[in-house]
C-alpha cells in the first residue's frame, strides 16, 4: 500500500441553482483520500449525496450540478481542469464505474463478447488479434461459467448476477487502477449479492485497486471496505475504519442507522430512527442531525459542529461523541409476546398451483402434452389468526405470485384458497363478494407506484372507506384523519399529494389505506424493500403495532431474511414456487436446515466486518422449475443422487409445525 | 379521536399551478399571447374592421398597401386588412367545436381499447391503422363532396377524422398507467371497472389528452384552411385565410400583398398553438423531448 493518496477529494462542494436562482448545495465541504489497494465505503440514505460524490470522482456531474468549491485529483491529475477528451481517456481506462443496474448499462443488441471487445478497443493497448483471448480471460476472472459460450450470448439471456459480472469484466477491460461502485449489488438476490461482493473483494486485493464503494447497505460495506465514510445531508459526519464505524460508531446518526438494521441473531424488532434528513436547500441551524438526535442540546441547534479528529483516528462531526455510549447500538425493545393459544385458521392454501404459461394455439391443435411445469406448485399452508407468516425466497421463487393469487389478481390453475376455515374464495377478484374482499388487503412494494399520483392522501383513503363502508362528507374525513393518526401521520396530510411526501410517509399512507378496510388479512409484498433502512425499521415497527391493535394476520413477503425474521411468527421458504421449509421462525433460522435455507442464510450480509458469508451454492436461479424431483436439485450442495431428480422430496416433520421438504434424512439435515 | 383541520396544508389548485408554469416559460407566454390575441380579434373584429369585408370597389382593384388600406386590396377591390381580421372567425369556430369532440370520442375509444386489450384491441387497431394510412384530404373530400360544405358537415367530418389519431395516443397513455400498482390496488379492493376508469385511470390520461388536443387543434386549423383553399371550406363572400390565399394566388407575380396578411395570420395562430402545447406538455411533466445525455 503506497502512502500517497491516489484519489484526493478536497473541500468539495457541489450544488445547483434553483429556479429562483438560489444556490442549493448537495455536498458541503467533503474531503476524502483513497490510497492504492484501499477500499472506502460511502454510506448514507437516499438524498445524502453519495452518488454525486462517487461520480465527482470521475469528474462527472449530473446535468445542472456544478462545483461550488474544492478539487478532485486522480493520480495527481486535476479532474476538474481536464477537457472532454482527456477525461474520456481516464474514465473507463484508469478509473472505471460499475453502476447499480448493469442490465441496463449493457447494450441489448450486442453479444457479450462484442461489447467486451469494444471496451478493449477503447481502453487497452492490446493488439486486436489478442482481443478474443483477453475477453475469455476477463470472463474467467469474473468467475462466469463457460466463458466461451458466454461470449455468444445477448445480455437478456443472462441472469441479473451474470449481467453484473459482465459489467465488472467490462470495467476491468481497461486495467483500471481505481473502481467506483455505485450500489453494485442493490436489487440482486442475497446469494448473488454475496458472490459478487466476494468477487469484488478478491479483484481489488489481487490488482491492488483503489475502490470507492457507494451503498446504503451496511452489510455490503462491511464485507468489502477497509474504511467507511458516513454522509448525512451532504456532509461527512463520521469517518473511520470499517471496524470502528460498524462496530462502535461515534456519531449518533451512524448509531441510529446501525441499530435500525434487522439482524439474524436478534429476535426483536430493530429500533427506528425517527424524523427525516433535511432536504437540499432547507435551512439548517447548527448540526444537521440535531432535530433527530437524542444527545442534542442548545449548542447543537445553534452552531454547526466541525469535523473533529479523534485519537482513535476517526473523524466525527459531533460535539457529544464522548457521550455516544448513552445510545444503545442493539435493539433493546423486547419483541411483543405472541400468543399461540388461538388456533383459528385465518386462511388456508390447499394444493395451490399457478401457471403463467397459456397453451399456445399450435400445442392445443396438436394436443402436445409437454406442458411446462407450473410456476407455483403444491403449496399447502394454513395461516393462523393473528400470526405473521413470512414468505422468503429469491426472485422468481413465486412469493409475490402467491400473494396475487390470494388477492384474486391471478387465477390459480389448481387448488383452493380458504378464508376463515370455511369460505372457499373465488379465483377472480370480480367474483368475490364485498365482505370477503374487505377482509383481504394488499400493500405493495413501491408506494410511488401504488398511490395514484393525481389523488390527495384524503382521496386515496376515501376509496376503501367509501367502497366498503359507504362513508361520506365529514364522517369520511374524520375517519381518514383517524387512520392517518394510526400510522403516525397528522391530519394535515389529508390534502397533500403523494409527490409531496417522502418514501416512508408514502408507505404509511399505503398502510393506512389497507387498514381503512378493517381487514383480517393483510398481504405485504416487499413493503420495505424500496425504503431506506431507518425508514424500514419504522415501517416494520408500525406494522407490528398495528397488528397488536387490530389482531390482523399478515402474510409478509420479502427477500430479506433478517427483515422476515424480525416480523414473522412463522416462515415459509420457497424456491421455484415450491415449498422447501415451513416452521416457526426460531426453528427455521436454526439448524437443522433445508439445504436451500442454509444457502440463503449463509449468504446474508451482516453489518459486521467479522462475519464472513458462507457460499455453499452457486447463484444462478433456473429460468423454470425442473419437471420432476426437488426444485433445488441443480444448485443443491448436498444432493444425494438421482432420487433428487426423479422424486418429489417428502415433507419431513422436524419439530412442532416445522416441516422440511428434502430427501436427506432428519438426523443428517 | 383527532380533530380534523380542513386544508391546513397549503395546496394550490393544480390547474392554476400548471397555467402559471406555462406562463413562466418563454414558449408558453409567447404562444398563449398569440392564441389569445387571435381569439380576441376573432370576437371583436366585426366592430373594429375599417371597411366592410364584402364591400367591392372596382376602382381599387389590386392596389398596393397604403395608409388607408393597410394591406392593400384584392382583385375585387376589397380591403385585405379587414378581410384578414375577419378571416379566422369561421375557422376558429369550426375547429373550436370539432377539436373537443375529436379528443372526447378518440380519447374514449382509445382508453377502451387500452383497457380491453388482447385480440379485440389488436384487430381494431389495424382498422385504425388502415384509416390513418389514407391521405386525410382524400377521406375528407369524399364526405364533403357527398354531403356538401357548411358547418354542419365540416364539424362532424373534422371531428371524426381527427379523432382517429387520438385513439392511438389515448391507448398508449392508458397502457402506461394500466400496469401500475395503484390500478392493481383498486382492482384488488374490488372497485368496478367503471369506477377504476373514472377515478384512477382518467386523471392520469387527461394530461396527455390535453396536449394531444392542442396539437390536433393546430392540425385541424391547417386542414380547414386547406379545404377553404381548395374551395370546400368557407363559401364566398365570407372571408377565410385559406380562401384568400387561394384567391390571391393568381396575382402573386404582380400583387404579392394579397397573401401576406392571411399567411401571417394563419401561421402565427398555428405557431402560437404549437408553442402553447409544447409548454403545456413541459408543465404537465409529460414532455419526452429531453436533451440527450451525450
Image: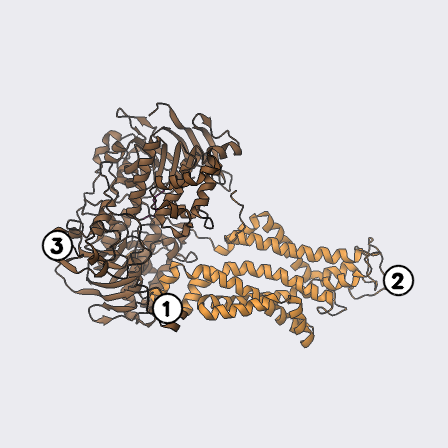
Write the start and end of the magenta stretch as one range: A184-188
Disc 3 secondary structure class: helix
* Chain A, hue in figure: brown
Q: Are marks 1 and 3 on the same chain?
A: yes
Residues indicated by labels 1 and 2 sit on the same polypeptide chain: no
From the image, tell me which residue sits under label 2. B59
**Label 1, label 3: how many angstroms apart (C-alpha)?**
40 Å
Q: Give a yes or no on whether discs 2 and 3 share a subunit.
A: no
B150 in the magenta segment: no
Image quadrant occupied by the N terminus of chain A: top left
- Mark 2 residue element: helix
Q: Is residue A242 visible?
A: yes
Mark pair 2, 3: CA separation: 114 Å
Contact (CB < 8 A) between labels 1 and 2?
no
Q: Is residue B140 above or below residue B277?
A: below
Give B7 or B231, whichever is nearer the viewer: B231
Q: Which residue is mark 1?
A: A359
- Point out residue A155 in the picture as x, y percentages from the top left corner: 41, 49
Q: Which residue is mark 3?
A: A666
For the point 72% across and 61% down, the residue is B241
Amino acid at each position: 500500500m503506497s502512502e500517497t493518496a491516489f484519489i484526493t477529494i478536497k473541500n468539495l462542494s457541489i450544488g445547483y441553482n434553483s429556479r429562483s436562482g438560489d444556490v442549493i448545495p448537495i455536498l458541503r465541504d467533503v474531503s476524502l483520500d483513497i490510497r492504492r489497494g484501499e477500499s472506502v465505503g460511502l454510506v448514507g440514505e437516499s438524498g445524502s449525496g453519495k452518488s454525486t460524490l462517487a461520480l465527482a470522482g470521475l469528474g462527472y456531474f449530473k446535468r445542472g450540478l456544478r462545483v461550488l468549491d474544492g478539487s478532485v485529483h486522480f493520480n495527481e491529475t486535476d479532474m476538474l481542469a481536464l477537457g472532454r477528451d482527456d477525461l474520456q481517456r481516464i474514465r473507463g481506462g484508469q478509473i472505471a464505474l460499475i453502476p447499480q443496474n448493469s442490465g441496463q448499462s449493457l447494450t441489448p443488441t450486442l453479444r457479450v463478447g462484442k461489447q467486451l471487445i469494444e471496451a478493449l478497443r477503447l481502453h487497452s493497448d492490446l493488439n486486436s488479434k489478442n482481443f478474443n483471448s483477453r475477453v475469455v480471460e476477463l470472463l474467467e476472472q469474473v468467475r462466469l461459467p463457460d466463458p466461451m459460450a458466454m461470449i455468444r450470448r445477448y445480455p437478456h439471456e443472462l441472469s441479473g448476477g451474470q449481467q453484473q459480472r459482465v459489467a465488472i469484466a467490462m470495467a476491468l477491460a481497461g486495467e483500471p487502477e481505481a473502481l467506483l461502485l455505485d450500489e453494485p449489488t442493490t436489487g440482486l438476490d442475497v446469494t448473488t449479492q454475496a458472490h459478487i461482493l466476494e468477487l469484488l473483494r478478491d479483484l481489488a486485493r489481487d490488482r491492488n485497486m483503489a475502490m470507492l464503494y457507494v451503498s446504503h447497505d451496511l452489510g455490503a460495506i462491511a464485507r468489502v471496505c477497509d474504511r467507511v465514510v458516513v454522509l448525512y445531508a451532504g456532509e461527512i459526519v463520521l469517518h473511520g475504519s470499517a471496524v470502528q464505524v460498524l462496530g462502535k460508531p461515534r456519531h449518533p446518526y451512524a448509531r441510529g442507522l446501525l441499530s435500525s438494521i434487522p439482524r439474524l441473531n436478534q429476535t426483536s424488532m430493530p429500533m427506528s430512527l425517527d424524523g427525516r434528513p433535511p432536504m437540499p436547500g432547507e435551512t439548517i441551524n447548527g448540526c444537521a442531525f440535531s432535530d433527530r438526535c437524542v444527545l442534542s442540546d442548545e449548542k447543537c441547534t445553534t452552531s454547526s459542529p466541525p469535523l473533529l479528529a479523534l485519537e482513535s483516528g476517526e473523524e466525527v462531526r459531533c460535539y457529544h461523541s464522548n457521550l455516544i455510549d448513552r445510545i444503545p447500538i442493539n435493539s433493546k425493545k423486547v419483541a411483543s409476546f405472541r400468543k399461540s393459544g388461538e388456533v383459528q385458521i385465518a386462511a388456508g392454501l390447499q394444493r395451490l398451483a399457478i401457471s403463467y404459461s397459456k397453451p399456445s394455439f399450435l400445442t392445443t391443435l396438436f394436443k402436445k402434452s409437454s406442458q411446462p411445469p407450473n410456476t407455483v406448485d403444491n403449496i399447502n399452508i394454513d395461516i393462523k389468526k393473528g400470526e405473521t407468516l413470512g414468505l422468503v425466497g429469491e426472485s422468481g421463487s413465486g412469493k409475490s405470485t402467491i400473494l396475487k393469487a390470494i388477492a384474486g389478481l391471478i387465477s390459480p390453475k389448481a387448488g383452493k384458497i380458504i378464508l376463515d376455515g370455511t369460505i372457499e374464495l373465488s379465483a377472480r377478484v370480480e367474483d368475490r363478494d364485498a365482505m370477503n374482499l374487505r377482509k383481504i388487503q394488499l400493500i405493495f412494494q413501491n408506494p410511488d407506484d401504488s398511490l395514484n399520483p393525481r389523488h390527495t392522501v384524503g382521496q386515496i383513503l376515501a376509496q376503501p372507506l367509501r367502497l366498503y363502508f359507504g362513508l361520506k362528507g365529514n364522517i369520511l374525513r374524520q375517519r381518514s384523519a383517524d387512520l392517518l393518526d394510526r400510522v403516525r401521520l397528522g391530519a394535515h396530510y389529508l390534502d397533500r399529494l403523494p409527490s409531496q411526501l417522502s418514501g416512508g410517509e408514502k408507505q404509511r399512507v399505503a398502510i393506512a389505506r389497507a387498514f381503512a378496510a378493517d381487514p383480517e388479512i393483510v398481504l405485504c409484498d416487499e413493503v420495505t424493500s424500496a425504503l431506506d433502512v431507518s425508514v424500514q425499521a419504522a415501517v416494520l415497527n408500525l406494522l407490528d403495532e398495528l397488528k397488536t391493535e387490530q389482531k390482523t394476520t399478515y402474510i409478509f413477503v420479502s427477500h430479506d431474511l433478517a427483515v422476515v425474521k424480525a416480523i414473522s411468527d412463522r416462515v415459509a421458504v420457497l424456491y421455484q414456487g415450491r415449498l422447501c421449509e415451513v416452521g416457526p421462525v426460531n426453528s427455521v433460522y436454526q439448524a437443522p436446515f433445508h439445504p436451500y435455507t442454509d444457502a440463503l442464510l449463509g449468504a446474508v450480509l451482516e453489518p459486521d466486518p467479522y462475519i464472513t458469508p458462507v457460499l455453499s451454492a452457486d447463484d444462478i436461479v433456473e429460468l423454470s422449475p425442473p419437471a420432476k424431483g426437488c426444485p433445488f436439485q441443480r444448485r443443491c450442495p448436498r444432493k444425494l443422487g438421482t432420487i433428487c431428480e426423479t422424486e418429489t422430496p417428502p415433507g419431513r416433520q422436524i419439530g412442532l409445525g416445522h416441516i422440511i421438504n428434502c430427501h436427506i434424512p432428519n438426523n443428517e439435515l | 379521536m383527532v380533530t380534523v383541520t380542513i386544508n391546513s396544508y397549503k395546496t394550490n389548485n393544480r390547474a392554476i399551478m400548471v397555467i402559471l408554469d406555462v406562463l413562466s416559460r418563454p414558449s408558453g407566454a409567447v404562444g398563449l399571447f398569440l392564441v389569445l390575441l387571435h381569439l380576441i380579434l376573432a370576437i371583436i373584429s366585426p366592430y373594429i374592421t375599417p371597411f366592410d369585408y364584402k364591400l367591392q370597389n372596382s376602382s381599387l382593384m389590386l392596389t398596393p398597401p397604403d395608409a388607408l388600406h393597410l394591406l392593400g386590396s384584392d382583385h375585387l377591390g376589397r380591403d385585405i386588412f379587414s378581410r384578414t381580421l375577419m378571416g379566422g372567425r369561421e375557422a376558429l369556430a369550426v375547429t373550436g367545436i370539432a377539436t373537443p369532440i375529436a379528443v372526447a370520442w378518440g380519447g374514449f375509444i382509445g382508453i377502451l381499447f387500452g383497457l380491453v386489450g388482447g385480440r379485440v384491441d389488436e384487430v381494431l387497431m389495424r382498422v385504425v391503422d388502415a384509416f390513418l394510412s389514407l391521405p386525410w384530404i382524400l377521406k375528407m373530400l369524399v364526405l364533403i363532396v357527398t354531403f356538401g360544405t357548411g358547418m354542419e358537415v365540416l364539424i362532424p367530418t373534422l371531428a371524426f377524422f381527427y379523432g382517429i389519431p387520438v385513439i392511438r395516443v389515448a391507448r398508449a397513455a392508458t397502457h402506461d398507467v394500466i400496469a401500475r400498482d395503484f390500478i392493481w390496488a383498486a382492482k384488488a379492493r374490488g372497485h368496478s371497472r367503471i369506477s377504476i376508469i373514472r377515478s384512477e385511470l382518467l386523471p392520469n390520461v387527461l394530461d396527455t389528452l390535453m396536449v394531444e388536443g392542442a396539437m390536433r387543434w393546430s392540425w385541424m386549423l391547417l386542414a380547414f384552411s386547406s379545404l377553404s383553399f381548395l374551395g370546400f371550406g368557407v363559401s364566398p363572400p365570407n372571408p377565410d385565410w385559406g380562401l384568400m390565399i387561394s384567391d390571391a394566388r393568381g396575382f402573386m407575380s404582380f400583387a404579392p400583398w394579397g397573401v401576406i396578411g392571411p399567411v401571417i395570420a394563419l401561421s402565427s395562430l398555428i405557431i402560437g398553438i404549437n408553442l402553447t402545447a409544447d409548454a403545456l406538455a413541459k408543465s404537465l411533466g409529460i414532455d419526452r423531448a429531453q436533451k440527450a445525455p451525450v
